[in-house]
Image: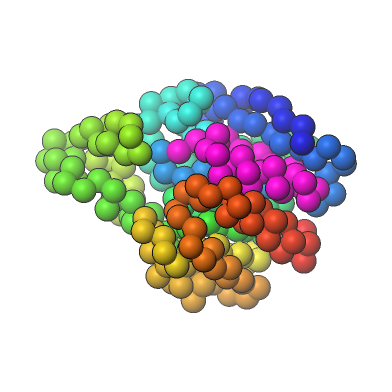
Amino acid sequence: MKSEKITFPGSQGGELAARIDRPDQHTSKGSVLFAHCFTCSKNLRAVGHISRTLTDHGMSVFRFDFTGLGESEGDFSNTNFSSNVDDLIAAATYMKQHEIVPRMLMGHSLGGAAVLQAADRIASVEAIATIGAPCNPEHVQHLLTDKKEIIEEKGEADVRLAGRTFTIKKQFLDDLSAQKMDGIIRNLGKALLIFHSPVDNTVGIDNAAHIYKLAKHPKSFISLDDADHLLSNEEDAKYVGSVAAAWADRYL
């Protein structure tokens, strides 16, 4: 695998950090644009394992940090789900300008919801894969626990997520509430692959069932057996990458 670090302009004006992973040989199956999970980064270990597995199967992978996360510029507190979708569009635009045309979108957790939302705005995309994705981005509100009322009353609050503290503003909650995912899923018009673990304690398996029920064919569901939400077991992440690559043969 050949890996290159780059930056590109995000939707809010800051430079976003990205990594382009390419096969050692010629790319034969096209390029994947990957969206990481809520408050995570492109460097999450599972994302690295998935990316390496995809490149082993002849696909290039473009993964990046959303505004205000990881190595990207910007203030996380001023971002929301809509800005994440706009960052995906900015990434796709950069890819096209540099002849790395995105043909498949892949998203983990909230990133999965984001790629479903962005798909219609990226004409080159033919296939989508989600991993542990919520059927509606409002699902992340349960992570805010008792801070939601404080955010509503005071306009913002510091929330501890995955061992780090983030400032969440009311505009973030308002944006989540404004999303209408059901219609988007019904009208995807792209091949869809849904990965989900039946024992996912962060995003329940019922979310996968809802997405699958609404989406039109071609659609597929793959159970991740006993995997956790973050795919912390290397073998689970590699399994996702290898199955996604094999599935993509039919559509790319």
**Looking at the picture, how far across and down is residue 73, in whole percent?**
48, 23
**Looking at the picture, how far across and down is residue 22, in whole percent?**
76, 37
Q: Is residue 110 left or right of residue 131?
A: left
- Height in image: 191 above or below 39? below
**Looking at the picture, how far across and down is residue 30, in whole percent?**
78, 49
How does the figure colour the protein chain or chains? rainbow
- Residue 13 in magenta stretch: no
Count of numbered labels shown in the rendering:
0
Q: Is residue 19 left or right of residue 82?
A: right
Query: Between residues 194 and 202, which one lies in front from this camera angle?
Result: 202
- Residue 47 in magenta stretch: yes
For the point 41% across and 60% down, the residue is: 200
**Looking at the picture, how far across and down is residue 50, in whole percent?**
63, 47
Query: Between residues 149 and 144, which one lies in front from this camera angle?
Result: 144
Q: Is residue 138 left or right of residue 193?
A: left
Q: Is residue 146 visible?
A: yes
Q: Which residue occupies the extreme right position in the image?
A: 26
For the point 85% across and 49% down, the residue is: 28
- Height in image: 122 above or below 4? below
Quadrant including the C terminus: bottom right
Quadrant including the N terminus: top right
Q: Is residue 122 visible?
A: no
For the point 55% across and 34% down, the residue is: 43
- Height in image: 137 above or below 4? below
Boundaries of the magenta span: 40-64
For the point 71% across and 27% down, the residue is: 4
Q: Is residue 97 left or right of residue 237?
A: right
